[in-house]
Amino acid sequence: DLYHLQVTEGDLATRLRRLLPRIGHVQIANPPGRHEPGAGEVHFPFLLDLLDTEGYEGFVGCEYAPSEGDTDRSLRWAQPYGIRPRGAGRQ
């Protein structure tokens, strides 16, 4: 749970590298406020790239409250990873 790890201990990259052999699921939310990536203090593109570089093959789950109150808008951060909000790309 990267939200709580950042709030309680910080140094996410070092901790991910050290603990990755024991991690089966990564959960993300951005402090403060427990919002989507891009709406807080953690630079998630770096951490998601780190997971890829380190060979992580598990799931990444999102448990956050959309900062703008709209789930579809809160998923804009995920488009580079192949996740598209409903209606994205539709005319």
Image (tube, helix red, strand yellow):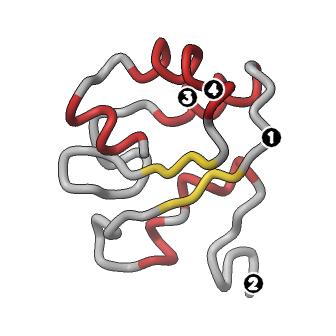
Question: For the residues carrying marks 1 and 2, which lies nearer the camera in this image?
Answer: 1
15, 46: nearer the viewer:
15
Percent coordinates x, y for residue 38 in the rendering: 40, 45
Q: Residue furthest front?
A: 22
Task: Work out how far the residue at label 1 is from the one at label 3, CA to CA, in angstroms.
Answer: 14 Å
Residue at left 55%, top 14%?
18
Residue 89 picture quarter: bottom right
Question: For the residues carrying marks 1 and 3, which lies nearer the camera in this image?
Answer: 1
Dot placed on the residue nearer the N-terminal end, 4 or 2: 4
The residue tagged 2 is: 90
**Along the horizontal axis of the image, is 46 left or right of 88?**
left
Q: Secondary structure at mark 1?
A: loop
The residue tagged 3 is: 47
Percent coordinates x, y for residue 55 in the rendering: 80, 26
User: Where 48 falls versus 17 (above or below)?
Assistant: below
Dot placed on the residue nearer the N-terminal end, 1 or 4: 4
Residue at left 55%, top 28%?
47
Answer whether labels 1 and 3 touch (C-beta < 8 Å). Answer: no
Residue at left 76%, top 20%?
53
Q: Secondary structure at mark 3?
A: helix
58, 78: nearer the viewer:
58
**Along the horizontal axis of the image, is 51 left or right of 12?**
right
The residue tagged 1 is: 57
